[in-house]
């Protein structure tokens, strides 16, 4: 599924139960090229427990969004900022 996610069509993707490789990372051929992969805040302490990731298109300026840190493997969140104000996006498992 992730390899078919078109970065020219989508800016964000909320993924639940992602496949994680043996080192605990979600990877497919186009992820690192087009997407910033956002893991739960405690992912690197317990990668086998992460149930959500967010994909943020690299064409979105990092000056306009940031990660909302949450101490759970079941939620990833970001806040987008722009002329529209602020929008928070949560991926809750």
Image (spheres, helix red, strand yellow):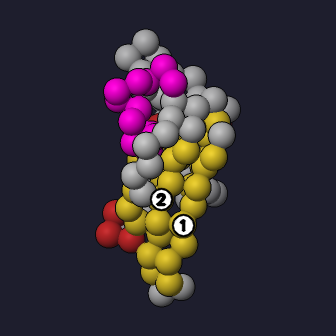
Residue 19 left/right relative to 24? right
The answer to whether 25 is drawn above or below residue 4 in the figure is above
Earlier in the chain: of badge 1 and badge 2, it is 2
Residue 75 lies, in percent from the top left, at 55, 44
> Looking at the figure, which quarter contains the N terminus?
top right
Span of residues in magenta: 38-49
Question: Where residue 37 appears, x then y in whole percent?
Answer: 44, 42
Label 1 crowd (10 A; few <14 / some 14-19 / many >=20): few
Residue appearing at x 38%, y 17% in the figure: 23
Residue drawn at 39 percent across, 36 percent down: 42
Viewer can see residue 1: yes
Percent coordinates x, y for residue 27 in the rendering: 47, 27
Q: Which residue is mark 2?
A: 78
| Residue 85 sits above or below residue 70 on the image | below
| Residue closer to the observer: 14 or 11 | 14
Q: Which residue is mark 1?
A: 88
Is-magenta flag for residue 39? yes
Q: Where 45 sits versus 66, above or below?
A: above
Residue at the extreme top: 22
CA neighbours of label 2 inside 10 A, class few (<14), some (14 to 19), many (20+): some
Q: Secondary structure at mark 1?
A: strand
Viewer-proximal residue, 47 or 31?
47
Disc 1 and disc 2 in contact, CB within 8 angstroms:
yes
Q: CA distance from mark 1 to mark 2?
A: 6 Å
Whether residue 28 appears in this view of the structure is: no
């Amino acid at each position: 599924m992730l390899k078919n996610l078109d970065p020219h069509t989508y800016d964000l993707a909320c993924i639940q139960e992602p496949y994680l490789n043996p080192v605990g990372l979600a990877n497919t051929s186009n992820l690192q090229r087009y997407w910033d992969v956002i893991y739960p805040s405690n992912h690197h302490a317990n990668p086998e427990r992460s149930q959500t990731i967010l994909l943020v298109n690299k064409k979105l300026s990092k000056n306009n969004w940031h990660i909302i840190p949450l101490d759970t493997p079941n939620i990833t969140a970001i806040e987008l900022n722009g002329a529209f104000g602020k929008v928070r996006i949560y991926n809750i498992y």
